[in-house]
């Protein structure tokens, strides 16, 4: 799985936080049998941010955590 595939997958796990207008990644909404795939995607994204391949702001924008 590459970075683009990981970001596409993680978009499926983005949801709004309760009463405030803020989004977050929630792995409890993904099917249990796919959870390891989502965890791998998160690890790929974190390593890419750490290695400077993508900024945190760009990641948030691409996974739709902003707005």
Image: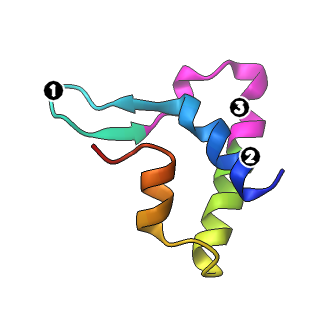
The residue that mark 3 highlights is 35
Location of residue 45 with respect to 1 vertically, above or below: below
- Corner quadrant of residue 15: top left
Image quadrant containing the C terminus: top left
The percent coordinates of residue 18 (x first, y second) are 23, 26
Q: Nearer the viewer, mark 3 or mark 2?
A: 2
- Say which residue label 2 marks: 5
Tell me: residue 4, above or below residue 21.
below
Helix, strand or loop for disc 2: helix
For this view, does 30 lie left or right of residue 17?
right
In the picture, measured across the screen, residue 24 lies left or right of residue 13, that is left
Give the magenta part as a residue range.
Answer: 25-38
Q: Is residue 39 above or below residue 20?
A: below
Residue with the mark numbered 1: 19
Indicate the position of residue 47 as horizontal and vertical percent values.
Answer: 67, 70
Q: Residue at x 19, y 35 (%)?
A: 21
Indicate the secondary structure of the residue bearing disc 3. Answer: helix
Give the residue displayed 48% in from the left and 33% down from the top. 26
Q: Position of residue 61 (x, y in %)?
A: 42, 53
Residue placed most toward the observer, 22 or 3: 3
Residue at position x 50%, y 72% in the image: 55
Image position, residue 22 (x, y; %): 25, 39
Q: Residue furthest bottom?
A: 52
Mark 3 or mark 1, earlier in chain: 1
């Amino acid at each position: 799985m590459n970075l683009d595939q990981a970001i596409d997958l993680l978009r499926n796990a983005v949801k709004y936080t309760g009463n405030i207008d803020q989004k977050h990644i929630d792995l409890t909404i993904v099917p249990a049998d796919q959870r390891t795939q989502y965890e791998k995607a998160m690890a790929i994204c974190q390593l890419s941010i750490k290695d400077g391949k993508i900024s945190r702001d760009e990641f948030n924008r691409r996974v739709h955590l902003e707005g």
